[in-house]
Image (tube, rainbow, N blue to C red):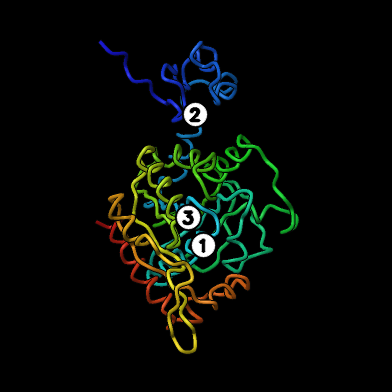
Amino acid sequence: MSAPEVENKPADAPEHCPGTESENAGKASACAGCPNQQICATGPKGPDPSIALVKEKLKEVRNKILVLSGKGGVGKSTVTALLSRAMAQLNPERNYGVLDVDICGPSQPRVLGVLGEQVHQSGSGWSPVYVEDNLSLMSIGFLLGSPDDAIIWRGPKKNGMIRQFLTEVDWGQLDYLVLDTPPGTSDEHLSATTFLKETDGNWGAVLVTTPQEVALLDVRKEITFCKKMGIPVVGVVENMSVFVCPKCTTESDIFPAKTGGAEKMCEEMEVAYLGKLPLDPRLAKCCDEGKDFITEHSKSPTVIALHQIVAKVQDFFDK
């Protein structure tokens, strides 16, 4: 008879890993040489009590969206801002929140135009900053003394900050909570996934890429991460698919899709393809200035494509 499968076994653990919740975690002979040995040996045993707190705090949040990208620089934070703004404008009767869990590079306060605002604490926890009447934001950027301050933290402290955001922010009733994550598949992603998978309601990941193969290679890893962690994949957005001149509307390939781009990759990886977002230079200017690109440039091909993507995302959660 084969040995039972060990629960809570890290993906890079050795074959005979006793499991992170075992009393022998980090101390068994199989743990020698494992990169997780010290963390397992010194960490608390048993289920994280914060999981129950997160579940209670987010019980009124119907849907959670993780915005992921295997590679930096593909416009993940921009897509997060566009997605949340568009949903909030198209559905004024619904409430939306954005949680910036990119601890070392928080950009949502600037992109959403609330840089310099302060969060307030009450008996029910931190109050997020409101961008619109039905769109709020929480970010570590609000807790820094200056936008130039660097956050030089190891994994456990970053994980603790994410835990604090999920247990102490008073979101109230939300239809959607959109989480902007850093690139890769590291501590922040594991923490967010561990907490969100135990909450009520629906959740899933929107992945962002650009058309060139160097970005697609990393997004393939992100899709594999989602499948291993049991994260439902809403679909993939191909950002900066083409450059559209604002004056003559001529299209130019900035990142040539020599291998078929994101659409071909989605077919191979068996995930949904949500659509393309053209590159509009006015979008970068609006993000830097914290202006609402959707309202200021409503006829941009990027906004038209965005609305089609939003419809597919909402269909995923409303079905």
For marks 3 and 1 on the same chain, the one whose residue lies earlier in the sequence: 1
Which residue appears at 50% of the width and 68% of the height?
A: 133
Q: Which residue is mark 2?
A: 48
Q: Is residue 8 above or below residue 155?
A: above
The residue at the far bottom in this view is 248
Q: Residues within 10 Å of mark 1 (few under 14, many from 20)?
A: some
Residue 61, position in %: x, y? 41, 51
Q: Amino acid at mark 3?
A: Val
Name the residue: 46% across, 52% down. Answer: 68
Q: Amino acid at mark 2?
A: Asp
Is tag 2's residue or tag 3's residue first in the polypeptide sequence?
2
Q: In the rendered view, would you say 88 is above or below 30?
A: below
* Crowd tier of the residue under label 3, counting other residues whose Cα lies within 10 Å: few below 14, some 14–19, many 20 or above: few
Name the residue at 44% across, 65% down.
239
Q: CA distance from mark 3 to mark 1?
A: 15 Å
Q: Write down the residue under mark 1.
A: 75
How far is disc 2 from disc 3 in space, using C-alphas?
Answer: 37 Å
Query: Callout 1, which amino acid?
Result: Gly
Vertical placement of residue 97 versus 7, above or below: below
